[in-house]
Image (tube, helix red, strand yellow):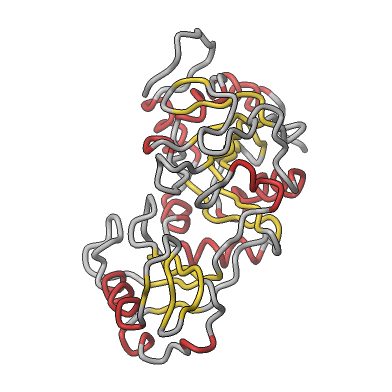
Amino acid sequence: MHFTSERWAGILGMNARNLYVERENTLDAIRLVNNKHLTKTALQKANIPVAPTLALVSDRRELATIDWQGLPDSWVVKPNRGRQGAGVLLVAGRDTSGWCSASGRHLDQAEVEQQIREILEGEVSSGIADRDDAIMEPLIVPHEALKAVVPVGLPDIRIICYHDVPVLSMLRLPTQASKGRANLHQGGIGAGVDLATGKVYRAMMHGQPVTRHPDTDAPLIGLEVPDWDRVVDAASRSGSATGLAYAGADIVVDQDRGTLVLQVNARPGLEIQNVTGTGLAERLAQVAAVPAAA
């Protein structure tokens, strides 16, 4: 993991992170959050907002019963136990004989069905040897307040929580270089967000500080994440809802539905320290030092 030349106190390394995971997160909770459908169910029981499920396809028989005409114009299909965006298909709208992808490419029903069959057979699902389920959800539209810094793709917010206390947060912004994905290693922007205000105070791209979006020239510093209070509230309750004491919640703000939790991670990455300029170990120690409420 790369850090800039600044010297920060309390950096959390990979081995120390793994010790937190082993000590704080049960195997049952880890298995749950590795399953998107079970995670959504647990979050819904806790009244935490998630994207609606249009369909959960578990086998080819269920694939044959999908009401294609009843689907909204735009939607997404993804593996239930996939990781890092593998196997995700984004459908941006209908055309004269099917749909078009987010990149504008034509998609017909046969191609979509083949994608789902590959998901069912576990071909795009990490750690799954033989099979998986396919989840279909409405396509998320980024909030209007973020349009200037989202020329393509979907931004998300990562908040790491320890015993339900938010400790670090960042906004991940896609770029043309990252091909519309909010992946920092592929050229996305990581922006540190102040937990108290929801405002960006620092931004990094390819390990270097940036102050403006490279595609739109829109300013990044001072950008305010919309619906911030609900974003933090949803993140702070996601750990308890899924049984994790050390958790990373990935959240989006949809134009129509507002705050939605996309997934909860039992082993959130450590790049957030480089993005925010803050060591996780120090923040975790501060939470641990506060006596638990009676």
Q: Residue 77's image quarter? A: bottom left
Pinpoint residue 229: horizontal percent, then vertical percent. Answer: 77, 44
Pinpoint residue 124: horizontal percent, then vertical percent. Answer: 28, 61
Name above or below for residue 160 compared with residue 58. above
Total marks drawn?
Answer: 0
Point 58% across, 38% down: residue:
171
Which one is nearer the viewer's eye here, 128 or 25? 128
Q: Residue 207's image quarter? A: top left
Point 59% across, 24% down: residue:
211
Point 59% across, 28% down: residue:
212
Instruction: Specify whether 118 is left or right of 228.
Output: left
Pinpoint residue 31: horizontal percent, then vertical percent. Answer: 41, 56
Name above or below for residue 75 compared with residue 181. below
For the N terminus, the quadrant is top left
Name above or below for residue 92 compared with residue 62. above
Pinpoint residue 168: horizontal percent, then vertical percent. Answer: 61, 31
Point 50% across, 68% down: residue:
92
For the C terminus, the quadrant is top right
Instruction: Specify whether 86 is left or right of 67.
Output: left
Which one is nearer the viewer's eye here, 85 or 37? 85
